[in-house]
Amino acid sequence: MLLWITGKGLLGSALVHECNGSLPVLHTGREVDVADREKVFPFAEQHPGITHIVNCAAFSEVDKAELMKEEAYRANAEGPKNLAQLACQMGAKLIHISTDYVFPGTSRRLLTEQDRVNPCNYYGWTKLRGEENVLAHSMCVIRTSWLFGAKGKNFVSKLLKLLLSQKEVRLTDDQWGRFTYAPDLAKAILKMLHHTGLYQYANAGVATRYEFGLAMREEAFFMGYPILTEAVIPVPGAAFPTPCPRPEYSAFDTEKIEPYVKIRHWREALRDFLCAQLPVYL
Ligand SMILES: NC(=O)c1ccc[n+]([C@@H]2O[C@H](COP(=O)([O-])OP(=O)(O)OC[C@H]3O[C@@H](n4cnc5c(N)ncnc54)[C@H](OP(=O)(O)O)[C@@H]3O)[C@@H](O)[C@H]2O)c1
């Protein structure tokens, strides 16, 4: 077994860490542009014996995707297509990571893999094309949402910095989703290596960013973080206008993946995140 992990961002790094010497791994970043067939196919030829590919490479900056349409489309739609074709040709398995942003976000109930997709922004649209390209080759897609972890830019890492530096923190309380701790998703991916089809994975419990912020302040304070924030204030999403819309409600139903992977509540995952970060801040 030889696993090729693309993408050196938040998830790619967590996944490599999770493999931790127990699995032979190839890990590539920008040097193997997944959208460039002239890079992808020769890389595989130079590394015979790849049995599994996990695609964590993506153009993940939602607002920038509106401005850099071609680049976003290349990474999020063409990249997965190349990897799916390559996997077919090599007789390997591909797991591609997608997003809750494929949903329009207008419904108010947990969303299953069968629910109607209709992205409300260009990033979501490119990710949907990527899903279609992968599923057309009978490979595996795992959607995830509101990802957080130690590496990379993410809301939860920024929130911790705010709680350590600001007296008041304002957080939206009218957008609902399911947070996902990158190391938990990494464990789930390794359990799903032999699967095909569409799945959704996130930590348990639907929350707003405000609810998450309250919990983080409480847990971090209890752990001994030097928290400065005295008030976490709920605000509407309109308080933080963004260049493109986000789904208002995009919480997954994860029943389909649950027979294969363990799913714990986001609050438990948050405690692990804070424990892991503590040495950095004390
Ligand atoms: N973060 C979230 O909240 C979230 C939520 C739902 C789903 N997802 C999905 O989860 C997956 C992992 O996300 P993440 O948070 O780990 O993203 P990330 O931190 O942005 O990592 C993605 C990596 O892919 C690289 N990349 C971009 N275009 C590439 C290309 N053409 N070829 C090779 N590498 C390329 C990026 O390089 P640069 O840094 O140089 O651009 C970056 O290192 C993505 O599929 C994303 O759509 C993320």
Image: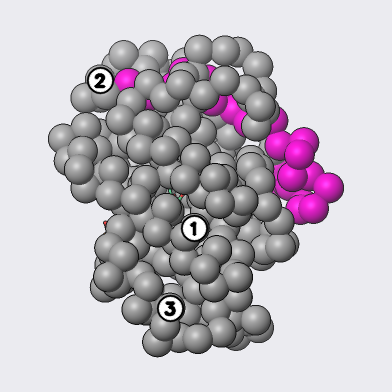
Pointer 3 or 2: first along the chain = 3
Residue type for callout 2 = Pro
Mark 3 touches mark 1? (CB < 8 Å): no
Q: Residues within 10 Å of mark 1 (few under 14, many from 20)?
A: many
Q: Quadrant of the C terminus?
A: bottom left
> Label for residue 147?
none
Q: Residues within 10 Å of mark 3 (few under 14, many from 20)?
A: some
The magenta-colored residue range is: 245-269
Question: 181 or 132, which is in the foreground?
Answer: 132
| Residue denoted by label 3 | 44
| Residue denoted by label 1 | 84
| Residue denoted by label 2 | 241
Q: Position of residue 108 (x, y in %)?
A: 60, 13
Q: How many marks?
A: 3
Which SS does the magenta portion mostly show? loop
Disc 3 secondary structure class? helix
Marks 2, 1: nearer the viewer: 1
The residue depicted at 34 percent of the width and 62 percent of the height is 34
Disc 1 secondary structure class? helix
Q: Quadrant of the N terminus?
A: bottom right
